[in-house]
Image (tube, rainbow, N blue to C red):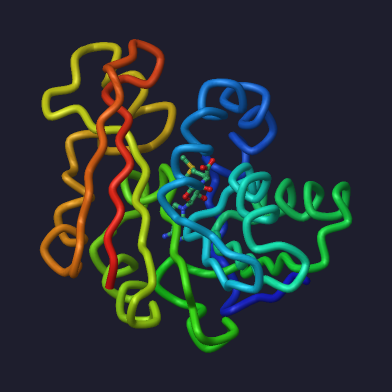
């Protein structure tokens, strides 16, 4: 259930943030995770990769979507976040979830093919060189598969936005949906009203390969 491809680097901040991550953010993003699930259009038996899965908060919507015959693969570089994710998996007794301790642009060989769906939830705004993992997983996605980027954007973060950037180690001004828009056969972008809590506007972008 818990593989290492290759050994993750120690990510000081997220290893520590893992301790309070779910308590701080679970409620804030609950509805947004449902929106991401709807965009993914999961079906029983599918394989979905959750890039930068963190504590596995999205597994709560991914696992019911793919059912007992499907597979959820969570990839993250933070040992602390993955420990939380592993705890969540054990608590629920999910047999169809696999965790990869890896850089976001790695792990392809360890994932069962075909890859039907990819989710990047609050991860591309955090991952350095985020275009590489995007490209890596877009190419890994099966033809006809769906790629969902769900994140927060603020073109000009104010003081509060900058505070969120510091806490999340994120860059909210990145236009992380753009490569998906450019490369998808069909693309849709849905914005939510701006929110003080998030530091910007939450969006769900979905592209079909
Ligand atoms: C804001 S958290 C989002 C976690 C989760 N997707 C969620 O929705 O709650 C960003 C995650 O990206 C992970 N991350 C950052 N850089 C990474 C990298 N280069 N490779 C893999 N994971 C990375 C962090 O460890 C963290 O778990």
Q: Position of residue 9 (x, y in %)?
A: 54, 63
The residue drawn where x is 47% and y is 60% is 51
Q: Nearer the viewer, residue 64 or 99?
A: 64
Please indicate whether residue 110 sits to the left or right of residue 179 in the image: right
Please indicate whether residue 49 sits to the left or right of residue 136 in the image: right
Task: Name which quarter of the figure residue 153 lies in.
Answer: top left
Number of numbered discs present?
0
The residue drawn where x is 30% and y is 25% is 192
Q: Position of residue 89 (x, y in %)?
A: 79, 54
Quadrant of image for the N terminus:
bottom right
The residue drawn where x is 54% and y is 67% is 48
In the depicted structure, whether residue 71 falls above or below residue 204 = below
Task: Name which quarter of the figure residue 207 lies in.
Answer: bottom left
Please indicate whether residue 113 sits to the left or right of residue 1 in the image: left
In the depicted structure, whether residue 119 falls above or below residue 61 = below
The residue drawn where x is 65% and y is 31% is 22
Q: Position of residue 47 (x, y in %)?
A: 57, 73
């Amino acid at each position: 259930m818990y593989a290492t491809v290759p050994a993750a680097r120690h990510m000081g901040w997220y290893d520590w943030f893992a301790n309070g991550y779910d308590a701080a953010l679970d409620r804030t993003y609950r509805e947004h995770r449902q929106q991401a699930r709807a965009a993914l259009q999961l079906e029983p038996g599918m394989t979905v990769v959750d890039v930068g899965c963190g504590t596995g908060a999205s597994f709560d919507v991914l696992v019911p979507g793919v059912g007992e015959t499907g597979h959820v693969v969570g990839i993250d570089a933070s040992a602390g976040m993955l420990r939380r994710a592993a705890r969540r998996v054990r608590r629920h007794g999910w047999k169809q979830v696999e965790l990869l301790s890896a850089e976001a642009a790695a792990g392809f060989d360890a994932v069962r093919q075909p890859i039907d769906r990819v989710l990047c939830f609050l991860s591309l705004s955090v991952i350095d060189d985020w275009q590489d993992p995007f490209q890596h997983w877009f190419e890994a996605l099966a033809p006809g598969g769906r790629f969902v980027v769900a994140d927060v954007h603020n073109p000009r973060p104010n003081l509060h936005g900058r505070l969120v950037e510091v806490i999340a180690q994120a860059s909210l001004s990145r236009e992380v949906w753009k490569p998906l828009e450019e490369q998808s056969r069909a693309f849709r972008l849905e914005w939510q009203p701006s929110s003080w809590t998030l530091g910007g506007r939450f969006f769900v972008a979905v592209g079909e390969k």
